[in-house]
Image (cartoon, rainbow, N blue to C red):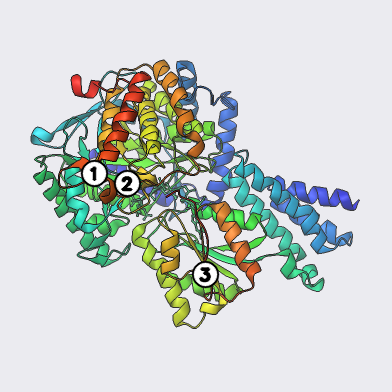
Amino acid sequence: MSLRTEKILRSLDRAYNGPICSVKDWDTKVIPQTIRAILKKYGLEKTCDLENPINCDDDLADQFFRAGWELALELGMLNVETERIIKITEEELIDTLKHKPKEIILGSGSDQVILKARKPEDPTPPLLAASLGIVVSEELYVPIVEGIVKYKKLVDVLHGPSLATVYGRKIRSGTPYETLMGGYEAELRCEALWRAGRPGMAHTGIAGAVTEYGHLGGAAAIGGPGNVTMALCPVELKTNFAVFHRIMMAINNNMRIRAGGFSYIGGYAGPPEGAALANIAVDLLIATILDSDYTSSYVYDIQLLGNCGRKALWANSIAIQAVSRNTNLIRNKIVNETGGPCTDMFMYEAAIGLMNHCVSGASKTTQPRSAGGKLTDYLTPMEAWWCGEVFKSCAGMTRKQANEIAKKVLPKYEERLSNPPKGKSVLECFDLKEMRPSPEYQKLYLDIRKELIDLGMPLDKVYEEF
Amino acid sequence: MKEQILERLCNAIVECDVEQAAKVAQEALDASIPAIEAIQNGAAKGLDIIGSKFNSGEAYLPELILAGDAMKAVFDVLSKALKEENADSSAQLGKVVIGTVSGDLHDIGKNIVAALLAVNGFEVYDLGINVEPKTFVQKAEEIGATIIAASTLLTTSMPYQQDIVQYLIDSGLRGKYYYVVGGGPVTADWTIKIKADGHGYTATDAVEVCKRLVRSGQTPGTFEPVILEYYQG
Ligand code: B12
């Protein structure tokens, strides 16, 4: 039995014999009360600084880390089906951090990339996976993916969109249609990568697998150590059997594990400080309980249905910095834009969100989440390219510089966060034959790019240096 | 004395104290305060406070849920008196069966909608996640609901929202329940296409839509859906 299998089985066993707690009590009492108490104990209440959305205070980040450490050990994660808590010991957590790799190799051949642990203000450029599982029409799947991965400098890993239909049939979650879709999506992904001349690019599993069925249907076809399985946990500090199924699939197919859990401002974790604390704890817990190679957890704002407002920027900055400064954990951090393709809103949100993640120490991101990722065909290669350009170019900036830029750009979009423009669908603003944006979208890109360069964002760097 | 009890009732809700809320509700009964007054001038005020605190980011989801529970406890104590006062319908807007449809585990948005509905005077039955179409209808029949509300964030689970309408039609119950849909990918077009009665973009909209529906007095399934959606075009 491998060490990984042993660790996962230990966690699964605990899901059956750990302390009992109902989901309702966990969500409405245990989580909020414990978070409140720990924030108080460490003097972290009301530390969120909306005037300075990107944290520049190392001591504060370290204090958050200490508090997050305590939260992780005090709580553990609740397994939803058995309503039992999977607890970890401090020795296990220390052991986890000691043995996590500082870098891992993704992909194969000339498409291989190295995913590294990063520190705040790290000059090493982070990696970009694209796109999030935004749903696209079946006939557009291959060209959109081909476009997304076109530029090696910008996009490193294929997360991929989701399919709207399988052979023209509507896909219903958790049915044989979904199982069939799993294999079919794997096939289309490989075809698109081959067409783009990047056959060795890493996959992160079946994007459209909403349940185990799609995952089981397709994950094996894109398995192996250069590829990743994705297991996402319910909010807050919870896990479930769907997550464990995906982890077992990773073991069966010798894949890397990317596991994540989100934290909500306004949700069970409470204020921005509470969400940041929960986010730190969940990174530590997932790395230990699910033996992830890297985590994918971030803070989201329940009121704004995204994370590009001041509160979420701040909470993400402090949480990312806390873990970056104090561990070697590799972390994927997502920006949740609300504006759609071909809007200034999307471009501003992506630029500020990604700059923040980059200077705070994230290793990788998965992008774009245009129009919140909710609308079918509201995804073009252009958003992925823009995200790659910004995310990578910001490597090496100081947090102070980034904070100054954020303060200037936020007023350009923040009032629209609760009423964002949905933008245009792919066929309305992108030419999939020529693989270029419409003249309108191109102009928007050039204008905003120039505006941000004038404000101090080093956007030419990605083309010049790397 | 009366003012004091009403104030304590309001506070019990604001403090999300289920036991205290039930206890003060009983005191109100013992002090012969009409049940409808205890609700309107006591408990409901507490809910208003929590609701607006949540909207302004000063209160969070757990408070919203627990305040809803406390309100439920108040109703449990006062239900008999309310019936005797013949005030049942004016005190409560009606019963809502809510859930996230099959294959979908996203529940934060649905939980906010459920909690805000409860805080606004609906009696809410939350079926949780991954709920089969017919379970919504069965529960509605069992408890005598007015509204069925279905949430999904997954495009691949949207067909199950349509299945619920079909199940209502096929079982001859379409005219009995207002059917409201919501969640990320749900749009005005989809709502019209599947012939639901309402759709709201946010939880606040969901409450407004449900209120408008119950107050309309129209037969479900026979009118243009009530839609509050403002994703800019
Ligand atoms: C958090 C999240 C998760 C969490 C869910 C945690 C939980 N307990 O709920 C986790 C990590 C588990 C998760 C998993 C997955 N997710 Co997810 N997730 C999200 C995310 C980022 C936010 C959703 C959220 O909670 N929003 C906050 C709440 C407050 O907003 P809301 O749900 O929209 O609800 C509001 C309104 O819609 C409305 N409303 C909600 N319900 C109702 C009901 C009625 C009747 C009314 C009137 C109104 C209403 O009121 C609410 C409050 O204002 C979205 C992206 C996004 N921006 O939406 C993706 C998203 C929904 N997920 C997506 C995907 C693909 C997945 C996975 C398949 C990923 C994977 N491959 O594993 C799995 C699926 C698991 C499953 N079977 O359900 C896609 C769906 C794409 C699509 N169109 O189908 C999205 C859009 C991401 C994307 N494309 O970028 N996810």
Q: Position of residue B224 (x, y in %)?
A: 52, 69
In which quarter of the view is residue B96 placed?
A: bottom right
Is residue A19 at least partly visible in the picture?
yes
Q: Amino acid at mark 3?
A: Glu
Q: CA distance from mark 2 to mark 1?
A: 10 Å
| Residue drawn where x is 24% and y is 20% of the image | A461
Look at mark 1 in the image and give the residue it sits on: A204
Look at mark 3 in the image and give the residue it sits on: B224
Front-lying residue, B189 or A296 = B189
Look at discs 1 and 3 and give the one toward the viewer: 3
Looking at the image, residue B21 sits to the left or right of residue B222; the answer is: right
Q: Are marks 1 and 3 in contact (CB under 8 Å)?
A: no
Q: Is residue A270 above or below residue B206?
A: above
Q: Chain of mark 3?
A: B
Q: Chain of mark 1?
A: A
Q: Amino acid at mark 2?
A: Ala
Q: Are marks 2 and 3 in contact (CB under 8 Å)?
A: no
| Residue drawn where x is 18% and y is 47% of the image | A432
State the SS at label 3. loop
- Mark 2 CB near ligand 1 (8 Å cut): yes
Q: Position of residue B36 (x, y in %)?
A: 80, 63
Look at mark 2 in the image and give the residue it sits on: A231
State the SS at label 1. loop
| Residue drawn where x is 40% and y is 28% of the image | A320
State the SS at label 2. strand
Front-lying residue, A108 or A17 = A108
Packing grade of label 1 (10 A; few <14, some 14-19, many >=20) is many
Looking at the image, residue B45 sits to the left or right of residue B94; the answer is: right
Packing grade of label 2 (10 A; few <14, some 14-19, many >=20) is many
Q: Is residue B158 above or below residue A45?
A: below
Q: Chain of mark 2?
A: A
Q: CA distance from mark 1 to mark 3?
A: 43 Å
